[in-house]
Image: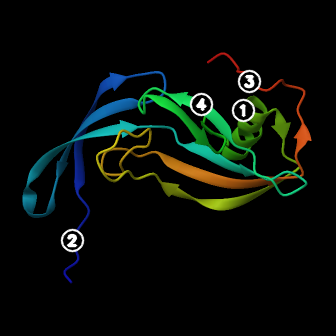
Amino acid sequence: MRHMPDPRLLSTETAYAGRLFNVSLDRIEMDGGVIAFRETIRHPGAVCMVPVTADGNLLFVTQYRHAAGRRLLELPAGTLEPGEEPLAAVSRELQEEVGQRPGRVEGLGGFYVARRGTRPSTSTCTSAANSRLRSWRATKMRTSKWKRGHRRRR
C-alpha cells in the first residue's frame, strides 16, 4: 500500500462563529497538487461520564435534542468551556446534570464521534468535525451543593 502524504492547509477562514462551535472554510492541497475545499465544524471538545452509584447503578439523563427532534436518554456529557481542563469539566457537568460530585474519576479514553446512516442525530461526522469526546468512569458519588439542573450562565 502506497503511503499518501497528509493534505497541506493553504488557508482557512471562519464562515460561521457560534456560541458552541465555529465553521471554517479550509483550502487544502491534496496528494498530487489537487486543491480542495473543506467545510469543518470546529468544536472545543467534550467530556462524557459513566457515573456509577454505590449500589452499581448507572446515572443517565434525559435531554431534549433539537437536531433529533425529541428527548434522548444519555450519559451525562458536556462541552469544554474555553480553557477548561477535561477533568474539571467532568465534575462540573456531573453536578449540573445529576446533582452529584465524583469522589473518584478514571479515564476511559477519547474518540471522535462518527455518525452513520441517514437518521437525524445529534452527533457529528468525523469527516466534517474535529470534536473529540473524552470519556470517564465516575464513582464514589456524593451529593453536590448544586441542585440538579443548575446551569452556569454561558
Circle on res. 4 = 2
Type of amino acid at the residue the image marks with label 2 = Met
Graded by Cα atoms within 10 Å as few (under 14), some (14 to 19) or many (20 or more), the crowding at tag 3 reads: few
* Comes first in the chain, label 2 or label 1: 2
* Comes first in the chain, label 4 or label 3: 4
Type of amino acid at the residue the image marks with label 4 = Gln
Q: With 123 as the anchor, is 64 left or right in this view?
A: right
Residue identifier under label 1: 97
Quadrant the N terminus occupies: bottom left
Mark 3 and mark 1: span between their CA atoms?
6 Å
Mark 2 and mark 3: span between their CA atoms?
48 Å
Q: What element carries label 4?
A: strand
Spot the residue most to the top. Answer: 153
Q: Which residue is drawn at 61% across and 61% down?
A: 109
Q: Which residue is drawn at 39% across and 43% down?
A: 124
Q: Which residue is drawn at 14% across and 63% down?
A: 31
Graded by Cα atoms within 10 Å as few (under 14), some (14 to 19) or many (20 or more), the crowding at tag 4 reads: few
Report the number of discs.
4
Single out the mark in the foreground, 4 or 3: 4
* Comes first in the chain, label 4 or label 1: 4
Residue identifier under label 4: 63
Type of amino acid at the residue the image marks with label 1 = Glu
Q: Tell me whether circle 4 and circle 3 mark residues in contact (CB < 8 Å).
A: no
Q: Is residue 151 visible?
A: yes
Circle on res. 149 = 3
Single out the mark in the foreground, 4 or 2: 4
